[in-house]
Amino acid sequence: MDIREILIRYKEGSLDRGSASQLLGALTVGEFGTVPSPEAPEALEVLEVPVAVEERVSGGLADTDADVVAVVGMAGRYPRAADLDAFWQNVSEGRDTSAEAPADRPGAPLLGSGERGHFLDAVDEFDPEFFGLTEDEGRLMDPQERLFLETAWEALEDAGCTGSRLDALTGTGGRPRAVGVFVGAASADYALLAAESWARGGRRTPRSGHWGLAGRLSAQLRLSGPAQAVDTSWSSGLVAVHHAVQALRRGECAAAVAGAVELLLHPSRARAGAGEGVGAVVLKPLRRALADGDRVYAVIRATSAGGSARTVAPARFGLCETRGSTVGRIGDAGAATGIAALTSAVLQLRHGVLAPAGDGHGARPWQGPRHAVVAFAEDESAGAGGVGGLGAHLVVEEFVPRESRAAVEALLAPAPRDAVERDEHVLLSAPTPRHLAASAQRLADHLDGAGPAAVNLPALARALRGARSAHPCRVALRARDVPRLVASLRRFVADDGDITDLRDGRGDPLGLSALPETADYLAALWRSGHVERLTGLWLSGVEIDWVALEGGPSGGRRHAATPLPPSAFLRRPLWLEPDEAAPVHRERRG
């Protein structure tokens, strides 16, 4: 861990002051801002890239570059990886993710005897209640649509773009929730299964067309940005990111969700080496991300797709992610291949490690400055006269914040002796009491795993207030330190603690949320330190814009990101017909 990473983690709240000071003090610092490290490896790839891409990468990165786009949130599920932590372990260790086709999946058998592929677990499961949907609605949704809905929600939570912070993403004319959605998808196996079910007498028919992948998320969250589905074969995920970046640069939205999904559900597409996956990234203009205090995973300097991918003289990059390198990790994952390649590149940039690439080398340290290109050539597999997939390129770089010597010295200085400890109000909410208990359990496990020294409790409480959506089932816990918070969370789960349940529609009985004077009243309570009174109003159902309150009288929206675990889903098997799902009823937290 170098000085840059320590400072980033401290600002995010994942390191407290004491831990950051110890880490900085332990480093042998030569010239300010550098730490002795292993020799950087040579560039892995010499590759021809589009004119526009090479021009953009030729100069240095400035925080104020108008066209630079920040990756501020990510989520995904890939073979043998239920989340991106597990995916990074697979990528960094070069693990083989192939397996036999799952025998209990509806639509099986998907592969022949002895054949292997790369599959996701439990793709027949979904949690409709979390999104306010009925069981029947869940059954009629394409599993790809369900999977992307969950993944996009996790990416938005990772970016801190739910709750008050989502409302604050205003577009042209002050439109709230100006977030675009761009999704790559190239298969429709669920429709084939529905046709076969109809022939057997079933009468459930899912909606056809990929438009629902983008439209469902946009409608579900009342987003006001553009929503578009993309099908360009293996490059679908990259082209979706390209469209998202262009929409941000044109000012069509304040932020964007871009991603892709691929599931193999019908034997007609069965093939050895098949892969599956789903991924999503949340993008913002870098200027906006810095103003909002977002965690920046990496920055996208340039994108191109189709005819704009004209090549010129070779340019050097430390990392080149291609369709081939990605297929080696997750199989032939169709539309999801591109978003998996981008995710892999961002994780390598973030961790400063070059993952094994099938060339006999293991993982290697990657020293800065770090530049990567994700390059998918045009798909020519259709042969002469055929129709192939679109070529696409992205140039991605590490983000190096402009930290000063003063920032390091301030951390190394002794903490003020007159600091007074006080209780923090930790607010949790969920769609149902069972979801609330599951999320409390997940938060307790997350805090135990991180350790008390790695968690800034005030920052954690602030993030839970302002960066998470307010659901109808609510609880407020008070704690002075992390161990006491963990104990309170575990007591709440074990004792089935009291909650406020607003699902009956009796929330905010006085109608305060609708009164224009309420905002001034809430601000006065905050300025006077009456957090307990505000907490009581929130529990009663009053809508509170915590981000606006904590931004002060100026209405500032800066809100430093703090790592939080995703909300818990309570998934269960849901298929077209009840008897076509997996034979054993199960519910799984995920």
Image: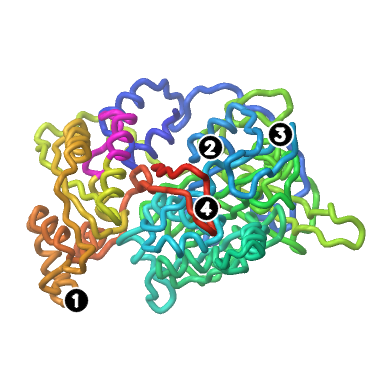
Position of residue 161 in the picture relative to residue 208 (left or right): left
Residue assigned mark 1 = 514
* Contact check, label 3 and label 1, Cβ < 8 Å: no
Which sits in the foreground, 548 or 238? 238
Residue assigned mark 4 = 579
Classed neighbour count for the residue bearing mark 4: other residues with Cα under 10 Å, few (<14), some (14–19), many (≥20): few
Which of labels 4 and 3 is toward the front?
4
Q: Is residue 385 above or below residue 367?
A: below
Q: Position of residue 340 (x, y in %)?
A: 61, 45
Q: Position of residue 189 (x, y in %)?
A: 65, 57
Residue assigned mark 2 = 81
Rounded to the nearest angstrom, the CA distance separating label 4 from label 3 is 51 Å
The three-letter code of the residue at mark 4 reads Asp
Look at 48% across and 54% down and name the residue there. 574
- Secondary structure of residue under mark 3: loop
Mark 1 or mark 3, which is nearer the start of the sequence?
3
The three-letter code of the residue at mark 2 reads Ala
